[in-house]
Image: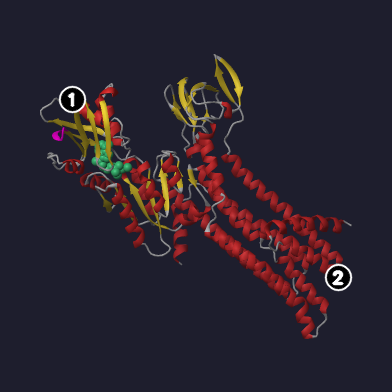
Amino acid sequence: SCVVITGYDMLIDTVTKLKRESEFNASLLIVITAAGAFVIDKGAEGAAVMLIFRAGEVVRSKLVRRSANDIESFMDLRPEAVNAVINGAIVQMAPGKINVGDVISVSPGERIALDGVVISGESELDTSALDGKAAPVFVTEGSKVLSGSMNLKGVLNMRVTADFDHSTVSRILELVEEAENRKAAPEKRIGKFARIYTPAVAAAALILGILVPVFGGMPINPWLQRALGLLVLASPAAYVISVSMTYFAGNGGASKKGIIFKGADVIDTMSRTTSVVFDKTGTLTDGIYRVVDVSALGLPESRLLMLAAYAELFSDHPIAHSIVVAADIMPDFAKVSDFREYPGKGTEIEIGGNSVAAGNALLMEELGVGADISQTEYSAVYIAVNRQYAGRILLRDTLKPDSVKAVKDLHTIGIDRIVLFTGDKREVAADIAGQLGIKEFYAECLPEDKFSRLKGLLNMQLKGDKLIFAGNGADDAPILKMADVGIAVGGFTSNETTDAADMIIMTDEASKIASAITLARYTDKIVRQNIMLSTGLKGLILLLAALGIAPMWAAALADAVFALIVLTNAKRAFGIKGRDIREIRRNKSDDEE
Ligand code: ADP
Ligand code: MG
């Protein structure tokens, strides 16, 4: 009766699955097998097969669920409740109920639920869940705080700057959840293969069990037994699960390091990267321009700086921010009108009846201003008042400390083509490229130049080679989209950038690109291992079963055990730590074999 019960709920299961997926599945095959076993008077063995299969399924789904839980619980950093400060009293509330501008209090040991700014208190934060950084970050009044960080020391009062759904943790989780819908090529191939493989094995079983003995004039029972053994093995479930699980684990492992892949397809593409193109400003340099020199023609330098600041007041360009900061003005917005931005060139504005333009040599050319364009290794902003040259400001932004490592690591893992794009001047580009050891760079690019250059690079690639573009500005969005993999460096910099990118690096460290490629290669390697393992083991047992060497129950047992092996292997992609360079190299030479 035990057989009947197991058989019955499996049948139900099968029918519902059939309805849902309308394809052959393992349970159906096992039910047929058991039924066949009864027919040839091997009821006990049929029961054993069913029990083993069932046990295998239970263990397997437990393992899948546990691995998924491990990974998810690691990523789910959303606290249940927050302490809101309302009229001086602390009230526990659900994070979803808190609005922008509300004040919350965060105790030591508490995970921060919402993004905000510290208004009182001092503490250290553990931000490792967001960016993989081990060292605690000191925060005090005025510091920006991202949700998902852990408060380590003191009580913090903070003003909320993003509601729950728009806070960093929720946005990361959203992306990770969406990631599951984007399948990698091997996953798709396996899915297709499974749809052919299962009916093929079923057909083979039919031939072996009925046609061979009937037309060969042989006793039917031993052949039926072999055929049933084949059917037991027909399930492709382990294949499918082990591959998807590997990508899932790889994505989880990446998020531990502050790297967010938007899908398994990205991991797959990343693993085949051969070129990396960097945008300069804000990606490799810090994007903070410091004024080096001001030279004014017929007006005081401070007045020139002030006019430039007015011209830059509404621009989002890093240069604009820096000039506004350097001029240190209290802007009188009433005086300003007619702001115009020339992308990749500069800005122009009307102020007190005069036009003021600030921008590079291209802008001066476009406006017909005869500026004194002298060669320097600095970025220059020329200023024209009423289209008359009035002076220039020299600025420089500095390399991020991490950028040298970013390029070096890429070289180390065998990515040889590294390219720099910038709208900045040739001399500046040459200087930065030189410091980084980048041989190929394109300077003075307008946004559309960057676009067509990238297109050119993509066209030049060999089939199967993949190109990464790493940038961080909203103006980089179209190029991020066009690249095989677009990487946004520096967290959620802007919605356009985050939406356009395929991968996000939560810190401002471009060196995580090399880590991400390594991780992708490692994940890819496990996927291939699992496919090979599956194919090899299945093939072997199939053969043994067909030859009548492996009895039905042994086939079922082998199938169950081997599902556990590939799943365990899959989980390794989650655990990846700072793999040493040798490991990465080995992966690379695997590819070349
Ligand atoms: P990148 O991000 O590589 O610097 P951009 O297209 O953002 O490229 O800018 C290209 C160049 O255009 C800058 O280096 C600067 O010379 C000039 N530029 C763009 N916007 C401004 C601005 N608001 N003020 C002054 N110069 C600007
Ligand atoms: Mg830019």
**Residue under pointer 1:** 303
- Outermost residue to the right: 1
Residue 465 figure quarter? bottom left
Figure coloring: secondary structure
Where 530 falls versus 40 (above or below)? above
- Relative image position of residue 135 (x, y in whole percent): 46, 34
Give whichever of 432, 320 is nearer the camera: 320
* Position of residue 162 measured from the top left corner of the image (x, y, whole percent): 49, 30
Question: Can you tell which quarter of the image residue 318 is in?
Answer: top left
Q: Which residues are magenta?
A: 385-391
Question: Would you place residue 94 above or below residue 545 in this image?
Answer: above
Q: Is residue 152 above or below residue 426?
A: above
Mark 2 lies on residue: 39
Amino acid under label 1?
Answer: Arg
Q: Give the position of the N terminus as an image quadrant.
A: bottom right
Foreground pick, 239 / 354: 354
**Residue appearing at x 12%, y 39% in the figure:** 372
388 inside magenta stretch = yes
Q: Residues within 10 Å of mark 2 (few under 14, many from 20)?
A: few
Q: Is residue 396 visible?
A: no
Which of the marked residues, 2 or 1, is nearer the chain's N terminus? 2
Judging from the image, what secondary structure is the residue with disc 1 in?
helix
Identity of the residue drawn at 44% across and 23% down: 140
Residue 215, visible in the rendered structure: yes
Q: Main secondary structure of the magenta part?
A: strand
Q: Quadrant of ligand 2?
A: top left
